[in-house]
Amino acid sequence: MEEKLTEKDMDQLEQWIGTGPKTFTRIYSITRDSCDPEIFHQRCDNKGATVTVLYNKHNSVYGGYTSVSWQSNTRGYMKDDKAFLYQLRYNGNDTINKFPVKSSKNAVFHKSDYGPTFGFDHDLLTFYQKSIRLTKFCGGVYPLNGTMEDFGTGYIANGVSVKRINNGTMEVTELEVYLVTDGRKKEKQKTISVQTDISAQKQKIPSQWRKTEDWNEEFHNELQEEIVNFKPIQDLNVSEARILMLGPVGAGKSSFFNTIDSIYRGRITQRAGSGSSEHSLTTTFVPYSIVISSGATLNFRLCDTRGLEETMGIDVLECNYLLDGNIPYYYEFNPTKPITPESPGFKSDPTGNDQVHCAVFVVDSTTLEVLSTKIVEKMKGLRGLMNQKGIPQLILLTKVDKLCNDVQKDVSQVFYSSKVEQAVDKASQLLGLPRANVLPVKNYENEAGLDNNVDILALLALRKMLHCSEDFMLNMKHREQDVQGEMGKLKLEK
């Protein structure tokens, strides 16, 4: 994780410390090291002077400085007449305040299960006890279990209230601890040799062919939360988005559902049957839903279908019924006897909940060059039907880790890989969809545990599917309003 303390902030802290030029070296960060008192003490004990910095979602920045080393083998208050609390920004605006220590004998509090703690009773208690260890980002923040309710007890408040420092909350986006040592400030430490500098300049920094936010735990949790909060367009009587997954046998339709399910279950799951076979392992129409830890069901379904084959699988007529919502849940496709309006369970009067709101063609990236012409033509035929109905279409490009060694080692390199970019171009040309509608993913296959980067790539794809579903629903709403408007005009004319 990138350090958040700016050079300007370092200058101000250096001025307050008042003993000459300082070097600031980050030794602890909750987004990198977890919010755990034990890890805090492992990284910060017996190091010397430190500055603790807290950042919150209101863009307020504040914290404390102590010239004595943190310790966990002693319990109690430590004397430090050089300690101070401070604030650098409030609601994004520079707000420069230093709060000197009032009671130096109680300047800081040391305890093995406490994070950085300042003042008697305490003016700033960041977090404590190991119960916080498992707390993850919630809405992009860490809800620290500390407090500043007694601010002004051990430090001089100078008339500033706690709410004007931390916005009345101990929820933070980051907490960092920097080691403070004598020497040049960080931005002036340019002791790199000329030869090393020249070599660094020669190194080509790869650029992303598709821009995304920085991949980190915060982004991971933001994506998860955005998908949890997804709701269909109001006034449509639609309670969930239906995303239809289509593609050749073995492309990874079922595996993609398992990947999404694994992310929200917190472990690798295999609810959908997957694997390799000559014919499709999926023979029924299964509208999978995602259930999160609270027991709530998310407002979308990933609808799995029989894999496309040259002479078997979904045909245009069955696809038409699927798109319109005529085919009942768990209908078993019979290659020798296609579904008709007379078939048991056939929905003659489907609702908006039955209709497909987004279609996704799932394609194995490693087979693009050898993909059967008949399969490609079949998918293009289905695309034509979807275009008539105005249904948005995407391509889910699976197994991209097998295209590039760098991506195989680290999935976060996917948008830097020229080989993956070439596969995206090929898939785009093959089915005639925009490049932006081609979504590379790597499904969980032989992993024993979850990987944040695999999660992020899958969640990015799912978010795009939900955005397209939302766009389609908005068009549905406008069509309904237009029809109602026209009917109203006809009644007035009569």
Image (cartoon, rainbow, N blue to C red):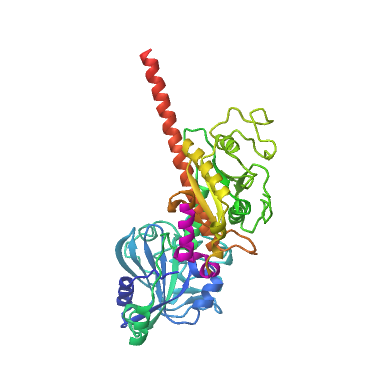
Q: Judge left or right: residue 365 versus residue 188.
A: right
Q: Which segment did they paint magenta?
A: 405-429
Q: Judge left or right: residue 308 versus residue 87.
A: right
Residue in the foreground of this view, choosing between 34 and 466: 466
Percent of width and height locating residue 230: 50, 45
- Identify whether 266 is placed above or below 182: above
Percent of width and height locating residue 203: 39, 77
Residue 133 on the magenta segment: no
Q: Judge left or right: residue 57 versus residue 351.
A: left
* Corner quadrant of residue 325: top right
Quarter of the image where the N terminus is located: bottom left
Percent of width and height locating residue 387: 47, 39
- Identify whether 105 is placed above or below 191: above
Percent of width and height locating residue 360: 53, 47
Q: Main secondary structure of the magenta part?
A: helix
> In the image, what residue occupies the spot 47% across and 33% down?
235
Q: Is residue 272 visible?
A: yes
Residue 406 on the magenta segment: yes
| Residue found farthest to the top | 494
Q: Is residue 103 visible?
A: no
- Identify whether 383 is placed above or below 24: above
